[in-house]
Image (cartoon, grey):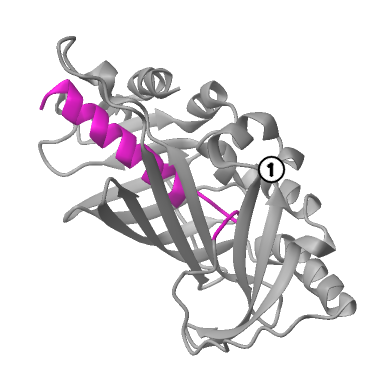
């Protein structure tokens, strides 16, 4: 496989890996899937708004107290009139972000593990570089290069920062929905990006606010969260020959929906044998520099 193909796959899988490793952080426009939704959204009283703010702030802690959960993941990426959807399912550690998941993208199945902020992916046969079945990307190093990019938005360690950045005016109760047989209440939240860690860098990538939709059960735990982000795509000129016309950056939108069930499910996240792994962190860092 050529280097360009490797780069595209690395970028796509890297994003999927970061998102699949996400715990307790999600942003969205409220347009995500609902089941038996109550569309009523009357103007809430100040007291109700305050209660909603408390509920959303405490949801992070209440969900993390369950230690682990099963997660179903859907990631839809759209650009230049085309879109692709990846699906994933597995188990995550709600505190440190470790996970074991299976992803399906472009008709191919990928086994994935995130351990201590290191992403491992077992690619379809014959597609991994170096003749080894697994690749490895150090998400911590990639996040360090990108500032608040990618992993910074979805870093489980930043969950509390989102809660601290929420004020009463930022939270709106949207109604109720039954998700996976569980009755939930939906809240829409607008988080001031400037209040987040590395907010200045993140603001350049995603704008001044992150509109977050969360669905909480009767115990105040997250049952669904949605992320909608629009970012500038890198110019294609660097990947084209010198004689080709350069292409101006476009926009890429990514919608991520995660459903949480099976709280307390046991998780066993083990590193693949070292001899079966090719480290792709350097390639990921090089790609990040080209796209910055």
Relative image position of residue 132 (x, y in whole percent): 19, 30
Q: Closer to the camera, 51 or 20?
A: 51
Q: Is residue 167 visible?
A: yes
Q: Is residue 17 left or right of residue 65?
A: left
Residue at 65% across, 67% down:
188
Quarter-wise, where is residue 224 in the image? bottom right
Image vertical order of residue 226 relative to residue 81, above or below:
below
| 31 is higher (above) or lower (below) than 45 | above
Residue 135 placed where, x, y %? 29, 32
- Magenta-drawn stretch contains 42: no
Q: Determine the secondary structure under disc 1.
A: helix
- Magenta span dominant secondary structure: helix
In this view, the residue farthest toward the top is: 242
Give the side of residue 71 with respect to residue 233, left or right: right
Would residue 80 be found to the left or right of residue 35 on screen?
left
Label 1, on which residue? Answer: 193
Q: Is 9 covered by the magenta stretch?
A: yes
Above or below — where is 292 with respect to 179?
above
Magenta extent: 1-28
In this rendering, does residue 116 appear at all?
no
Q: Residue at x 81, y 63 (%)?
A: 169
Residue 234 point in image, percent of width and height:
37, 28
- On the image, the x and y values in percent for residue 268 come to 45, 53
Q: Residues within 10 Å of mark 1 (few under 14, many from 20)?
A: many
Q: Residue at x 30, y 56 (%)?
A: 86
Tell me which residue sits at (71%, 79%) in the image.
219
């Amino acid at each position: 496989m050529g280097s360009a193909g490797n780069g595209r796959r690395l970028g796509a899988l890297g994003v999927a890996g970061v998102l699949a490793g996400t715990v307790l952080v999600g942003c969205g426009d409220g347009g995500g899937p609902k089941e038996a939704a109550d569309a009523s959204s009357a103007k809430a009283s100040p007291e109700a708004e305050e209660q909603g703010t408390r509920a959303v702030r405490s949801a992070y802690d209440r969900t993390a107290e369950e230690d682990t959960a099963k997660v179903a993941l859907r990631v839809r990426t759209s650009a230049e009139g085309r879109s692709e959807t990846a699906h994933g399912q597995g188990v995550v550690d709600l505190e440190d972000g470790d996970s074991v998941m299976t992803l399906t993208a472009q008709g191919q199945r990928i086994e994935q593990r995130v351990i201590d902020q290191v992403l491992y992916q077992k690619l379809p046969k014959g597609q991994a570089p170096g003749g080894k079945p697994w690749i490895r990307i150090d998400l911590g190093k990639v996040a360090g290069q990108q500032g608040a990019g990618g992993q910074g938005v979805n870093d489980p360690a930043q969950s509390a920062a989102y809660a601290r950045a929420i004020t009463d005016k930022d939270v709106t109760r949207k109604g109720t929905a039954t998700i996976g047989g569980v009755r939930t209440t939906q809240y829409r939240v607008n988080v001031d990006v400037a209040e987040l860690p590395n907010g200045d860098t993140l603001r350049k990538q995603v704008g001044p606010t992150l509109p977050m939709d969360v669905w909480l059960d009767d115990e105040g735990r997250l049952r669904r969260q949605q992320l909608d982000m629009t970012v500038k795509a890198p110019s294609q000129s660097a990947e084209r020959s010198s004689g080709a016309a350069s292409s101006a950056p476009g926009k890429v939108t990514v919608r991520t929906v995660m459903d949480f069930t099976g709280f307390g499910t046991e998780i066993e996240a083990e590193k693949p044998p070292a001899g079966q792994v090719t480290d792709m962190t350097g390639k990921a860092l090089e790609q990040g520099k080209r796209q910055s």
